[in-house]
Amino acid sequence: MSTLTILQQTTSSKKVALVEQQYPYGKSSVYMPTALVVVAAQLMAAGHEAHIVDLNIDPVVEGGPVKLFFEAVDVIGVAVIGAPYIPQTIELCRRFAVEYPNKPVIVGGQIISRLSQLQFSRLFAFTNAIQIASAEDLHPLFGQVPSPYEVSLVPVYEHLGMGRLCEYLKHEFPLWVSQGCAFNCKEYCTAERNQLEQHHHLEHFKDGIEYLILFAKKWALQDLGCYASSLDFFQNPDTVAQYLEVIAELRKKHDFNFRVRALSCLVTFLKAANTLPEFGKLLKDAGFWRVGFGVDGSGESEWKRQGKVQNHTADVRRSLDLCQKLGLQAEVIMITGYPTSSYKELAKTVYNSSGYLLRWRNIKLRAYFAKLVLPGNTGWQREWRTVEAVLDNPKLFYNLEFNSLGSPLTNPRRLNRWFGNLAFLILTLGVAIFGRSISFPLLPQGQGGLYGKLAKFWNRHMPIVD
Ligand code: B12
Ligand code: SF4
């Protein structure tokens, strides 16, 4: 008998509702909540009953099924994707504290794991919220649970039911491949950086994809499109080749169009192309069609300042040329508006981006506005005044959304903010006129009054960014 089986027998089985929250800008966005699928798989493997409630689809109405369901479970879990979800998560947890005062509410997601315990307690005061920063934090409530890398997602897919899974699979969905990045762009990055990349177990990965392909064929879905969870897909080329080979094999075996999109650093993409034999064929066979490169600035001086030392100007050209040669679409991910950017650097970002769009017809621009103080990055450790302001008024978390224009909180110098915002508007709305932008500007929406109403109205009408 394994240790896990013994622990399963000693911890009573619990019933859990895992909540995916509504898109924070006044409308719904249906997108498979893969993080919750993985958490549900971990809990189910440990002998618990886990159900996913998606507030983008399941309305919470008095006496309705979701309300009745919350009443029936032992634990409620809430997922937080990023900064703009924090204000509504606090409100939701306050509501739970009033309606279910004795029910523990576990709150997880990467941004939550980057808060100190003290910061979490301040934000979630007067609620039953428990911070889940790692799988170990689940142990007091659920006993031993397996690691996210070691679980099969098939039981959760089966449990979602035909209708819900079909609904999710009509859109692109996040595919659980890996987590972690060896680089350390420490000034702005809040992801799991500066650590070895870890992969979802290959057999479980294969079973999950095969299940989805067979499901799609059964219910006459023409194709499936996924967005790999990897932070830098090609970081470990030999390992990623094994995952691509599995997809290629399943595509061939079931004669099915499974499509893959992923993020990558320029340098690792080029290295993989040099190291892996028949790189282009491997990508084609695996249905790999689009790669998003973190260009993230105007050039060497800005990259150096942000700690993104792996980027080099010549690699942008080489990577985009290679994509064109291989028939891949490329996304240029461009962060602009750093509070340290000079006017020259802002102008150069716009100039370079326009140059890429003119020279390579196979690329789209994905611009973001830099947020240098966010849980997990260096600014969050250093800029205590900004951190205090956000903890005192959590609605300021809206200002930390990557698609939001710069505000006095993020860019205190007025001219830097104005020019940064101008550059961002050109890179989003300006480029959108030509159908080449896949990101759109939002307004920080936490304030009241006329501005607050206008910001909410604007945000509701902006297309949803993926
Ligand atoms: C798919 C994805 C999305 C999807 C989200 C789909 C969805 N509903 O889940 C979309 C495209 C919508 C999206 C949006 C955003 N995203 Co995103 N996204 C990703 C991506 C590529 C994969 C996420 C994933 O599925 N990972 C796999 C799962 C298994 O890992 P995980 O998310 O870390 O979850 C684990 C734990 O965190 C924990 N956990 C997570 N949730 C919960 C909940 C509970 C209750 C518990 C107990 C535990 C728990 O358990 C999981 C298993 O260990 C990641 C990159 C990455 N590598 O994570 C970026 C990433 C998560 N996104 C990020 C960000 C910032 C955003 C935005 C907030 C950007 C913005 N505009 O400001 C937006 C959200 C705002 C909006 N407008 O909706 C950042 C997060 C940075 C951080 N550490 O805070 C990442 C890391 C990208 C990056 N390189 O910076 N994203
Ligand atoms: S920005 Fe990208 S490459 Fe840099 S540390 Fe973060 S995940 Fe890694």
Image (spheres, rainbow, N blue to C red):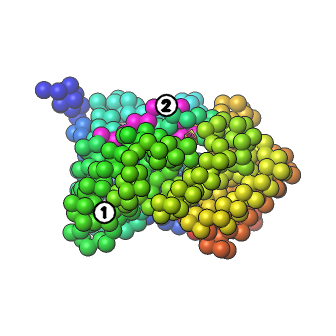
Secondary structure mostly taken by the magenta-highlighted segment of the chain: loop
Count the marks: how many?
A: 2
Classify 144 as above or below 61.
above
Give SS at disc 1: helix
Picture residue at 53% right of the left edge, 56% below the top: 322
> How packed is label 1: few (under 14 Cα within 10 Å), some, or many (20 or more)?
some
Classify 253 as above or below 217.
above
Picture residue at 50% right of the left edge, 37% below the top: 181
Q: Which residue is mark 1?
A: 165
In the rendered structure, which amino acid carries the disc numbered 2?
Answer: Gln
Front residue (pair 343, 10)? 343
Q: CA distance from mark 1 to mark 2?
A: 33 Å
Q: Is residue 198 magenta?
A: yes
Ligand 2 image position (quadrant): top right
Picture residue at 31% right of the left edge, 72% below the top: 222
Whether residue 235 is visible: yes
Q: Nearer the viewer, mark 1 or mark 2?
A: 2
Picture residue at 43% right of the left edge, 48% below the top: 229
Give SS at disc 2: loop
Magenta region, residue range: 190-201
Front residue (pair 385, 260)? 260
Q: Quadrant of residue 352?
A: bottom right
In the rendered structure, which amino acid carries the disc numbered 1?
Answer: Leu
Image x and y of residue 412, in percent: 81, 45
Q: Mark 1 or mark 2, which has the lower sequence index?
A: 1
Image x and y of residue 348, in percent: 77, 54
Q: Which residue is mark 2?
A: 195
> How packed is label 2: few (under 14 Cα within 10 Å), some, or many (20 or more)?
few
Q: Is residue 75 magenta?
A: no
Left or right of residue 460: residue 146: left
Whether residue 156 is visible: no
